[in-house]
Image (tube, rainbow, N blue to C red):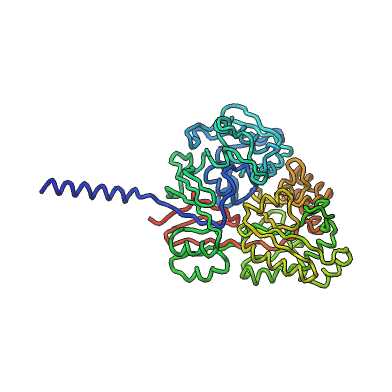
């Protein structure tokens, strides 16, 4: 009898121990898969936000978007030409290797490589050198403190891991260049990669040896791309996923009515644009009609931003005439204006430009910007009111993004949140500037305005923030007058979680930060 009781007690203790150590899993449903596991492969906010769970930079943003130490513990500007960083000692990569200055040097050289899509994220970078095992100096073209904001997205690799796996050169998603880092990782961050099945599931495990104090209670993070909005909602309601980072705006009322679901909404920093090819000829060899400003003005005159917001965005977007959101440094209220749609004005401009009946292809994505599939169709209908003939090319971003980055489009969409800089200089230097060296990395249309370029380069060299903002204002004014991009709106953020999610960090930059997520006990 005593033996039976002893066995029963042991079993009870065993079950209790299992319960205590039960794995805490977060199933994260997103509207699209990430592009690559290589943080240097594509300048995508969503891609970098995911990889920030695995990799880290020298500095990072705190919860109020102030800069704080990460892999560097302190920094100083030396002779107005060098940022000297002291590295955090005792940091381990996921494979157990120790972080040293050699890793930082290799990582910055990789990100700044001429073939790197991320080189535009740090236009002020000149070179980097090792001082000792825990000190590096980065040479910059100007002492502007914006450089520190820029490098929050420059992640650090293990130099030996890069070399041993023949992946010292950056990959490039848009150009179809892959490598070992495309599907494998080795960072220092709060989570480490367990497995990846593209377009199906990517699984991360908590890094138990992370140098920082964990503010989450997650053991396992499962990232599950679900492109269908209806399927994504159904997965949340059924409990197949715990959180979705892109709740369809048309379903928010339904979700809010469910007591087991919490809905979180904000207006994002991201501005969504309509853009036109500005090369000499279109991809099919025709002379490019969009190089005539009257055609670009006609396109803008046909777009009814308020109608898009009411019908497609359920009134949750912020219609905008500004190329940047009000919260972004460099915003000027006087540039945030737009006229009501005017088909008659547009028709007259097209006739004057000799572009009556203009036919072109409009490249859209069904999984990038919020409700893009619907507002693309709406814009196509609006453009047809002045006789334009619009063929919509719709598809997932995995297919459409390379077309856009390689210049194989006629009209297309893009969006920009001005991250990581949180300043208009990001849009100006990476998107609006002429493509040259570190400038214009995301200038997908091939536009060029020498006058704008002059102001952007002066802004890069300005040490006085007030002077820099004034120069940025002039550059933004030129971009607006020349219709380089047509801003549509700042899009809404809508996340939804099940009630087993106790807390989650949601900010206007719409980046997931699950190292702050806590699940109910």
Q: Nearer the viewer, residue 321 or 220?
A: 220
The residue at 67%/54% (across/down) is 416
Q: Does residue 434 lie above or below 380 as drawn?
A: above
Question: Which residue is at 54% across, 32% downward?
Answer: 161
Where residue 285 appears, as percent x and y from the top left, is 81, 52
Task: Decide if residue 458 is in sight here.
Answer: yes
Q: Going by the image, does 218 lie left or right of 449?
A: left
The C terminus sits in image quarter: bottom left
Pick whichever, 466 or 373, lies toward us: 373
Q: Is residue 478 left or right of residue 170?
A: right
- Of residues 1 and 280, the one drawn nearer to the viewer in this rendering: 280
Residue in the image at 65% along x and 32% along y? 137
Which residue in the rendered view is the most extreme toward the front? 284
Instruction: Tell me if residue 416 comes above or below residue 108 in the rendering.
Output: below
Quarter of the view holding residue 58: top right
Image location of residue 10, percent across then percent down: 21, 46
**In the image, residue 72 lies at what x, y percent?**
57, 37
Look at the image and tell me whether residue 326 can be seen. Answer: no
Left/right placement of residue 437 relative to residue 396 reads: right
Q: Position of residue 124 (x, y in %)?
A: 71, 40
């Amino acid at each position: 009898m005593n033996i039976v009781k002893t066995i029963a007690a042991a079993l009870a203790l065993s079950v209790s121990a299992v319960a205590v150590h039960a794995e805490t899993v977060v199933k994260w449903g997103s509207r699209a898969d990430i592009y690559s596991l290589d943080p240097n492969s594509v300048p995508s906010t969503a891609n970098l936000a995911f990889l920030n769970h695995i990799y880290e930079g020298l500095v990072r943003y705190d919860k109020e978007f102030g800069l704080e130490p990460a892999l560097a513990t302190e920094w100083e500007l030396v002779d107005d030409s060098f940022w000297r960083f002291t590295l955090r000692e005792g940091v381990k990569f996921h494979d157990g290797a120790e972080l040293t200055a050699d890793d930082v040097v290799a990582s910055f050289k990789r990100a700044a490589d001429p073939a790197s899509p991320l080189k535009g994220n740090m236009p002020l970078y000149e070179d980097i050198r090792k001082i000792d095992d825990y000190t590096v100096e980065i040479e910059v073209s100007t002492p502007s403190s914006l450089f520190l904001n820029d490098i929050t997205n420059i992640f650090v690799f293990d130099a030996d891991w890069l070399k041993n796996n023949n992946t010292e050169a950056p990959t490039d998603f848009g150009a179809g260049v892959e490598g070992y880092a495309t599907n494998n990782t080795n960072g220092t961050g709060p989570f480490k990669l367990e497995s990846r099945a593209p377009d199906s599931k990517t699984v991360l495990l908590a890094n138990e040896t992370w140098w920082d104090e964990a503010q989450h209670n997650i053991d396992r993070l499962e990232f599950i791309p679900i492109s269908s909005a209806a399927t994504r909602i159904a997965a949340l309601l059924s409990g197949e996923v715990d959180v979705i980072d892109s709740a369809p705006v048309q379903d928010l009322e339904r979700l809010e009515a469910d007591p087991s679901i919490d809905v979180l909404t904000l207006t994002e920093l991201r501005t969504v644009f309509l853009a036109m090819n500005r090369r000499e000829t279109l991809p099919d060899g025709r002379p490019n009609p969009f190089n005539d400003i009257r055609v670009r003005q006609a396109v803008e005159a046909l777009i009814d931003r308020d109608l898009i917001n009411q019908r497609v965005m359920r009134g949750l977007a912020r219609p905008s005439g500004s190329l940047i959101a009000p919260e972004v440094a460099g915003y000027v209220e006087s540039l945030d204006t737009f006229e009501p749609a005017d088909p008659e004005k547009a028709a007259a401009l097209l006739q004057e430009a000799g572009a009556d009946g203009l036919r072109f292809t409009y490249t859209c994505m069904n999984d990038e910007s919020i409700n893009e599939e619907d507002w693309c169709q709406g814009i196509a209908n609006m453009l047809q009111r002045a006789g334009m003939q619009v063929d919509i090319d719709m598809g997932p971003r995995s297919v459409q993004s390379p077309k856009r980055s390689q210049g194989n489009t006629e009209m297309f969409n893009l969006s920009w949140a001005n991250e990581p800089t949180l300043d208009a200089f990001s849009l100006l230097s990476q998107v609006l500037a002429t493509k040259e060296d570190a400038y214009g990395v995301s200038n997908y249309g091939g536009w060029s305005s020498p006058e704008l370029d002059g102001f952007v380069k002066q802004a890069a060299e300005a040490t006085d923030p007030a002077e820099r903002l004034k120069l940025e204002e002039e550059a933004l004014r030129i971009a607006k007058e020349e219709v380089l991009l047509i801003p549509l709106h700042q899009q809404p953020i809508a996340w939804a979680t099940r009630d087993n999610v106790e807390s989650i960090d949601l900010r206007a930059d719409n980046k997931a930060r699950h190292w702050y997520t806590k699940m109910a006990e």
